[in-house]
């Protein structure tokens, strides 16, 4: 009797389940919604703490500005609210001549740390690299007003003074 009841019950269950399924089983994800609604995370990397920032700083200090730029570019994607990532990104972009990227970084930093000497010195140095000595001086003097004992500001003002005495080249 058990064997005879088993087949009709299975048949009824198959008919019921086939009526519920509107599509292909391959279109379902583990959670029952469509597979295409789940994000593919296969290209997402895991970064321990501030690993990208540390690597970027090491490359920048070693004057490997292209590598630093790549690392900081990834860092601002991973840590979009971290001013250290943005200042590294903008500074390394300056050093490889990517002033469009540097400007983007400084715009974002302007909303995060607008009155900090680090920010003002970096923006001023960016202008110095471009040959815009008037704008560079303006930023360096703002940084000096905030922190007159800052050695970076003193060095930047010295660089600016040295740059004025050189002939401008086109």
Image (tube, helix red, strand yellow):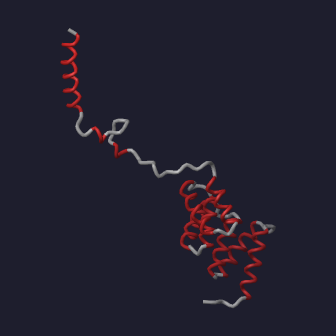
Q: Is 106 in front, or is 18?
A: 18
In which quadrant of the rendered view does residue 161 lie? bottom right
Residue 140 x/y as whole percent: 71, 73
Residue 115 x/y as whole percent: 68, 64
The residue most toward the front is 3
The residue most toward the right is 149
The residue most toward the top is 1
Classify the position of the N terminus by image quarter.
Answer: top left
Q: Is 144 in front, or is 96?
A: 96
In which quadrant of the rendered view does residue 167 lie? bottom right
Classify the position of the C terminus by image quarter.
Answer: bottom right
Residue 45 x/y as whole percent: 52, 51
In which quadrant of the rendered view does residue 34 lie? top left
Q: Residue at x 63, y 52 (%)?
A: 50
Q: Residue at x 32, y 39 (%)?
A: 28
Residue 24 x/y as whole percent: 25, 40
In this rendering, position of residue 98 left or right of residue 63 = left
The answer to whether residue 74 is above or below residue 126 is above
Q: Residue at x 21, y 18 (%)?
A: 9
In this rendering, position of residue 161 left or right of residue 16 = right
In this rendering, position of residue 143 left or right of residue 94 = right
The answer to whether residue 170 is above or below residue 112 is below
Q: How many marks?
A: 0
Q: Is 77 in front, or is 67?
A: 67
């Amino acid at each position: 009797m058990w064997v005879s009841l088993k087949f009709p019950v299975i048949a009824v269950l198959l008919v019921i389940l086939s009526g519920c399924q509107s599509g292909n089983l391959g279109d379902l994800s583990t959670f029952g919604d469509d597979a295409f609604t789940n994000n593919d995370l296969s290209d997402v990397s895991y970064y321990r703490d501030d690993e990208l920032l540390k690597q970027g700083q090491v490359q920048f200090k070693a004057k490997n500005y292209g590598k630093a730029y790549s690392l900081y570019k990834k860092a601002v994607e991973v840590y979009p609210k971290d001013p250290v990532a943005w200042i590294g990104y903008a500074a390394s972009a300056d050093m490889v001549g990517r002033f469009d990227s540097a400007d983007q970084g400084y715009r974002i930093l302007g909303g995060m740390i607008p009155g900090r000497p680090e920010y003002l010195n970096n923006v001023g140095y960016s202008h110095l690299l471009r040959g815009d000595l008037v704008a560079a001086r303006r930023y360096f003097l703002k940084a000096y007003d905030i922190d007159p004992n800052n050695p970076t500001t003193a060095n930047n003002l010295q660089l600016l003074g040295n740059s004025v005495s050189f002939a401008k080249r086109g």
